[in-house]
């Protein structure tokens, strides 16, 4: 077995989590919280979410550092009070929901 390291007794090759294998790897909890918020709205509405309000008049606000991190990574576009999820980000939210459901 060349180049494979084993983990535990499972016999499965160890695969480090990287941006290539997990696009969420390296994102801060603040950025992840914005994506979880999008997942919440998708679960609550039963419809695929393509945008979310990141701050409203009632005092609810997504973490500004998390929003900026997602914007800088090209995962969202900010337009006024709205965050528009990029197509790849929508797929990440779908995957997150699938993982929650098991």
Image (cartoon, rainbow, N blue to C red):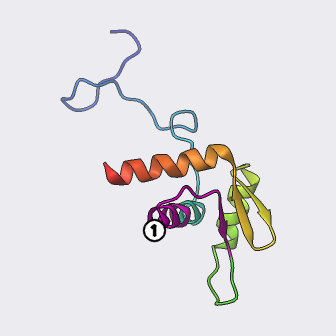
**Going by the picture, which residue comes out furthest to the left?**
9
* Label 1: how many Cα within 10 Å (few below 14, some 14–19, many 20+): few
Residue at image coords 59%, 58%: 49
**Going by the picture, which residue comes out furthest to the right?**
80
- Against 10, residue 29 (above or below) is below
Q: Position of residue 76 (x, y in %)?
A: 71, 55
Residue 78 shown left or right of residue 85 in the figure: right
Q: Position of residue 35 (x, y in %)?
A: 56, 60
Which of 9/62 is in front? 62
Q: Which residues are magenta?
A: 36-54
**Going by the picture, which residue comes out furthest to the bottom?**
58
Q: Position of residue 63 (x, y in %)?
A: 64, 73
In the rendered image, residue 41 lying in the magenta stretch gets the answer: yes
- Against 90, residue 66 (above or below) is below
In the rendered image, residue 25 lying in the magenta stretch gets the answer: no
Residue at image coords 32%, 9%: 1
Residue on which disc 1 sits: 44
Residue 22 shown left or right of residue 31 in the figure: left
Residue at image coords 41%, 30%: 15
């Amino acid at each position: 077995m060349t180049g494979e390291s084993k983990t535990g007794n499972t016999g499965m090759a160890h695969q480090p989590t990287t941006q290539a294998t997990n696009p969420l790897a390296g994102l801060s909890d603040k950025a992840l919280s914005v994506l979880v918020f999008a997942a919440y709205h998708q679960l609550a509405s039963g419809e695929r979410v393509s945008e979310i309000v990141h701050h409203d008049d009632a005092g609810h606000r997504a973490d500004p550092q998390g929003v900026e991190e997602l914007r800088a990574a090209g995962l969202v576009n900010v337009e006024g009070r709205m965050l528009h999820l990029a197509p790849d980000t929508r797929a990440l939210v779908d995957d997150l929901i699938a993982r929650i459901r098991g």
